[in-house]
Amino acid sequence: MLLSFRMGVYLAFLYDLIRLSRGFLFSGKAVGSIEDVIFWFYCTRKVFVLMNQEGDGILRWFAIAGALLGICLYLELVSPFLIRISAGIFRRIKRFTEYLSEKCRKSN
């Protein structure tokens, strides 16, 4: 169950990275849909490999419960903090690059 819990936390963290990239890279709906499909295929593969290795290919409900618990706890306890901090860092980087860009335009 601990491995499936860790898997849930890992997958939720990956999805946070995708959410952050969408918020700051302005990729559009089509790219976002493709990212989602790739993410879900990746998740399916990771969970399948975990179930196959740890459960001898048998679907174990406690493993699914562990992954869901990991996802839920991460999304409730860690994700809001991580998103807030990361968004602040990205905003500062964006402001700094806009400032540099403005300075370069004025000097030319």
Image (cartoon, rainbow, N blue to C red):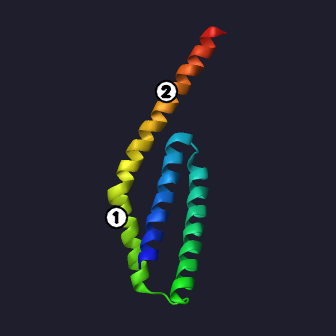
Residue of label 2: 95
Q: CA distance from mark 2 to mark 1?
A: 33 Å
What secondary structure is found at the residue carrying circle 2?
helix
Cβ–Cβ below 8 Å for labels 2 and 1? Answer: no
Q: Amino acid at mark 2?
A: Arg
Q: Amino acid at mark 1?
A: Leu
Question: Can you give x and y, in whole percent of width and height, for residue 90 in the image?
Answer: 48, 37
Left or right of 100, for residue 10: left
Name the image quarter holding residue 57.
bottom right
Q: Is residue 37 above or below residue 86?
A: below
Looking at the image, which residue sits at the far top?
107
Looking at the image, which residue sits at the far right?
108
Residue of label 1: 73
Which quadrant would the C terminus be assigned to in this image?
Answer: top right
Q: Earlier in the sequence, mark 2 or mark 1?
A: 1
Residue at image location 46% in from the left, 75% down from the top: 3
Residue at image location 56% in from the left, 52% down from the top: 32
